[in-house]
Amino acid sequence: MSEQAKKKATYEDLYSVPDNMIGEIIDGELIVTPRPSRKHTYATSILGSRVLPAYHFGEGGGPGGWIIIIEPEIKLGEHTMVPDLSGWKEQRFIWEEDQNPITVTPDWVCEVLYPSTLRLDRIKKMAKYADHGVNYLWLIDPEQTTLEVYRLESGRWLLLDAFDGPQKVRVEPFEEIEIDLGDLWPKRE
């Protein structure tokens, strides 16, 4: 063999990632991407501010019973990933673990698409979420002002619905509250 085998990345490799970047390990490869853009973090923050009170705390007619975390580090098998938002039904979440990444598979993950991470989110991460039994996946694109809602069915993603622009929606798994998608897109004067 003339080509040297590529060394698999380890969790310790994440310590070398600069503070202004996000490090993930997928299929043994260390993937380093820039911190999200303003549009990206705006959409994540606003969505979190809508879902978290109702589902985490049970406010405003929401059912509560969920743990919602922004940018958690999760470990799914050999993969370490950082989704934009994740949610666990409260009874499944483990508060005390010996290591930093959360090892309980989320019930819901939201990825906010950004041009530099679009292929990573849609191809590699989406497949790993399905492989490890994440029940729901949302893909939000602030540039295109879209939301895609997926549910895992027999190990494959089923597109439940797609929305464009400033619609008010009720979508799984958070259908008890109405989310105004127009709030996720920065207002341009």
Image (spheres, rainbow, N blue to C red):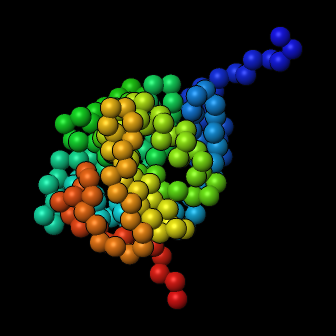
Image quarter of residue 12: top right
**93 on left or right of 156:** left
Disc tally is 0
Q: Quadrant of residue 178?
A: bottom left
Q: From the viewer's perspective, is 109 left or right of 79? A: left
Q: Position of residue 137 (x, y in %)?
A: 38, 47
Q: Is residue 183 left or right of residue 6?
A: left
**With 123 as the anchor, is 49 left or right in this view?**
left
Residue in the picture at 57% in, 33% down:
25
Q: Residue furthest right?
A: 2
Residue 105: percent from the left, percent from the top? 35, 34
* Relative depth, front residue between 71 and 5: 5
Q: The N terminus appears in which quarter of the rendering?
A: top right
Measured from the top left, where is residue 157 in percent x and y? 39, 41
Residue at (63% x, 39% y) in the render: 31
> Extreme top residue here?
1
- Say if 166 sits above or below 18 in the image: below
In the picture as drawn, the residue positioned furthest to the bottom comes out as: 189
Q: Residue at x 45, y 65 (%)?
A: 146
Residue 20 seen by the camera: no
Query: Residue 142 or 93: which is nearer the viewer?
Result: 142
**Residue occupying the point 47% across, 81% down:** 187
In the rendered view, would you say 125 is above or below 64? above
21 vs 96: above or below = below
Res. 112 visible in picture: yes
Vertical arrangement, residue 86 with respect to residue 75, above or below: below
